[in-house]
Amino acid sequence: MISFVQDDRIVRIDFNDPLSISPTTTVLNYLRGLPDHKGTKEGCAEGDCGACTVVLATLEGERLSYSAYDSCLIFVPMLHGKQLITVENVGRSDQLHPVQQAMVETDGSQCGYCTPGFIMSLFALYKQEKTVDREEINDALTGNLCRCTGYRPIVEAAARACVLENPDQFSQQESQVIDLLQTIRRDHGGQDIQRDDQHYMRPASLADALALKKQYPDALVVNGATDIGLLVTKQKKKLARILDISNIDSLKILENHPDRLEVGAGVNLEELRLKVRDSFPALYDMLAVFGSRQIRNMATLGGNLANASPIGDTPPVLMSYFAEIVVESTGGERRIPALDFITGYRTSQLREDELITRVILPRQQNGSVIRSYKISKRKDLDISTVSGSFRLHLDENNNVDEIYLIYGGMAAMTKRASKAEAFLTGKPWSRDSVEAAMDLVTEEFTPISDARSGAEGRKVMARNLLLKFWSDTAN
């Protein structure tokens, strides 16, 4: 049984009822099955188009926090303890919400198919408590595609409507919603859903999660589901056993220490992006082009690491920061250097009874320079073709004292260009040295050709990223 707030009331879903939906039904399909919630549209079913955007309000202390999500990637059990807001809730026929009114006034809608998703992204932007500028508007709308308007009027609508200290009907009703969510919270616990040949486990504590991982080592771990959701929406798989750890508060810590930042494995990437802008700029740069805001609100650092994809965005930059990955089982915890964590194609040192629980990011003490780069067919909302994260420390004579050249998309796993590193060590940080090392980068990797690029194209990209790194750090 799960409970959440929708249409100003508590909704309860019993998955054990044979007439109920399955635990891996997406929120999009749940909404499309209701008689009065057809505004949420399916455009791609993989988190690319934003037509299915909804907003979830989460109780944080004594206030509500509003965030936009792609409903095609959320399994219904993940709604437990939250408020689900759709385009039908935002305004009334006799009183449009300010973001809707602004869209009307700026002619921001033409065919209308994508409009509900834009309204929900604008609504989430409207409800956040910080200054909205053009950069913020563009980022908030990155996850919504439109083939009609050219975006200018929609951006204008955002600039007109999304200003601070602008109450709406949700402000007036917030106390009632908080009371409803607190009613659910008093019955806060894990969910264990068994239906037909599906077993969906959603523990509320880390101890319970580790015990379940030991009992069911084959369980598919969900900590964000931005990839796992596609198994259902695109590959039409019926997932037999899921261990969903997205409900565990202890995995969502963000702790500042003088010498390090500790990031829980369940911290979403949008929260992390905002946290590391000044202290870990290379990580910020990579997260700024990680999917869309809807994706980052759902994706987690632990999920991206555990995926161990050769084109994963975070592993190279975590390696260049000398991060440590903390993994735990019922037998205790281990700390694994990020540089050693990934062992092969989608494989890592994570054992079958372990979960990633946090990442430790040490603060830089010795003046090393770290940069991260991503090449993809489009700037936003795209998978890496080639990525690189590089770390450099020079001695007093401008010679290379230490260098790490870490690439994604160039091999079956995230991999260092070890020969180029060895060649550059001890040499002047000069264009001549770097151009010689670029040849070694070409020799060291044998990338594949696929839909994103040919192998030779990837080699050129990898070479040029090293040259760009030199250009960015030469002075």
Image: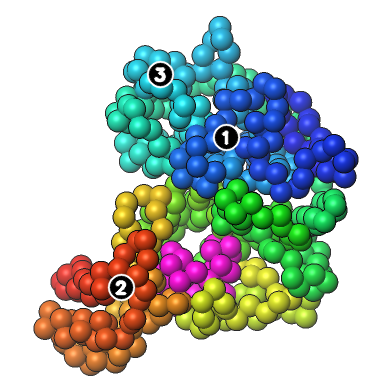
Q: Amino acid at mark 1?
A: Val
The residue type indicated by label 3 comes to: Ala
Determine whether 325 is above or below 110 in the image.
below
Q: Does the magenta portion include 334?
A: no
Q: Is residue 27 above or below residue 309?
A: above
| Earlier sequence position, callout 1 versus callout 2 | 1
Task: Please report the bounds of the magenta region as a residue range.
Answer: 301-325
Residue at numbered disc 1: 54
Q: Which residue is disc 3 drawn over?
A: 102
1 vs 3, front mark: 1
Nearer-the-camera pick, 302 or 321 = 302
Q: Is residue 373 visible?
A: no
Crowding near the residue tagged with mark 2, few <14, some 14–19, many ≥20 C-alpha atoms within 10 Å: some
How many numbered circles are shown?
A: 3
Q: Which is nearer the N-term, disc 1 or disc 3?
A: 1
Which residue: 58% across, 69% down? 306
Q: Amino acid at mark 2?
A: Ala
Foreground mark, 3 or 2?
2
Residue 107 lies, in percent from the top left, at: 35, 17
State which quarter of the image contains the C terminus: bottom left
Extreme-left residue of the structure: 432
Return the residue at label 2: 455
